[in-house]
Image (cartoon, helix red, strand yellow):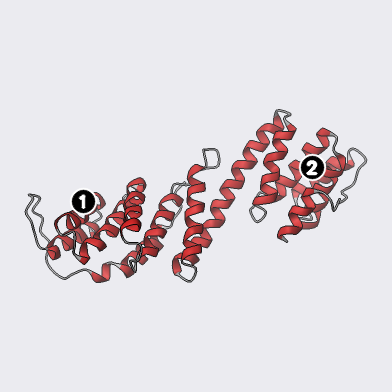
Amino acid sequence: MKINGRGFAGRLASLLLFASAIAGCGSTDEKYVERPVEQLYNQAMDSLSRGDTAKAAKEFDEVERQHPYSVWATKSELMSAYAHYLGNKYDDAILAAERFKQLHPGNKDIAYAYYLIAISYYEQITDVGRDQKVTDLAMNSLQEVVRRFPNTEYARDAKLKIDLARDHLAGKEMEIGRYYLRRGEYVAAINRFRTVVEKYQTTSHTAEALERLTEAYLSLGIVDEAQTAAAVLGHNYPGSEWYLDSYALLTGKDLRPEENKGSWISRAWSSVF
């Protein structure tokens, strides 16, 4: 699914870079001629404003090629990455932004390069039924933005996006766990649901993970863990459909939710809350 982050990215790109464009007229001449940096840069900006992102990226690259030691070459490297991003050429955007990071680690716009990489991964997050490698990459990149630039607008936006990335990773664990549960592979299922409880407690999948743990542990005859999962579920999500299901599973076997403080479930929950 496409997740909207480009309005924010575009606004920041405008603040950082568009305002610094040199006034002048762009040329539409496609024949290679060495031209003034002002003309090249503004031609690229014109292409970008018209929505021709592929052409704009090439033209920003041309600024760097013809005037590699100009301040506009440095700006053009980042603008090329931004143009690729706007054109949904995420791999190209990431490569260009990574190159900018390596060449200009102390540049005043370095935070934007990190952010552009993060949202290029983030906008590729798909449904939980697919491989979540890109979600891991998005999560790591977003966390790096927060860690390196904590007091910036980039970090504030990255924190919001991290929550969705975490929810996707938890959803993938749940999908695999349910698959194992249906096949009667209870230990494998428990391992997946445990990951959700231990690593993704703040996501929307935690209540179901606790209910599935109740079901899996009961199927294995590990009663105290099943009771603990249901007790923690009832304490944190009272009245939820998942607690009602867990309660019904236990009472169907003449059992009740009862927390064992020595259980990994209790320890995992108390370590976060």
Q: Position of residue 134 (x, y in %)?
A: 47, 45
Q: CA distance from mark 2 to mark 1?
A: 57 Å
Q: As drawn, is 259 to the left or to the right of 127? A: right
Return the residue at label 2: 214
Q: Amino acid at mark 1?
A: Lys
Left or right of 98 in this view: 249: right
The answer to which of 105 and 163 lies nearer the viewer is: 105
Report the residue at 66% width, 49% height from top: 205
Q: Position of residue 67 (x, y in %)?
A: 15, 60
| Circle 1 SS class | helix
**Contact check, label 2 and label 1, Cβ < 8 Å:** no
Residue furthest to the top in view is 183
* The C terminus, quarter of image: bottom right
The quadrant where residue 218 appears: top right
Mark 1, residue position: 58
Q: Secondary structure at mark 2?
A: helix
Where residue 133 appears, x then y in whole percent? Answer: 50, 42
Residue at the image position 70 percent from the left and 36 percent from the top = 189
Residue that appears at 37% across and 59% down: 113
Front residue of this view, candidates 97 and 40: 97
Q: Please tell me whether mark 2 or mark 1 is closer to you in this view.
A: 1
Name the one closer to the observer, 147 or 197. Answer: 147
The disc label shown at residue 213, or none:
none
Q: In the rendered structure, which disc, 2 or 1, sits on the residue that comes first in sequence?
A: 1
Residue at horizontal 88%, vertical 38%? 252
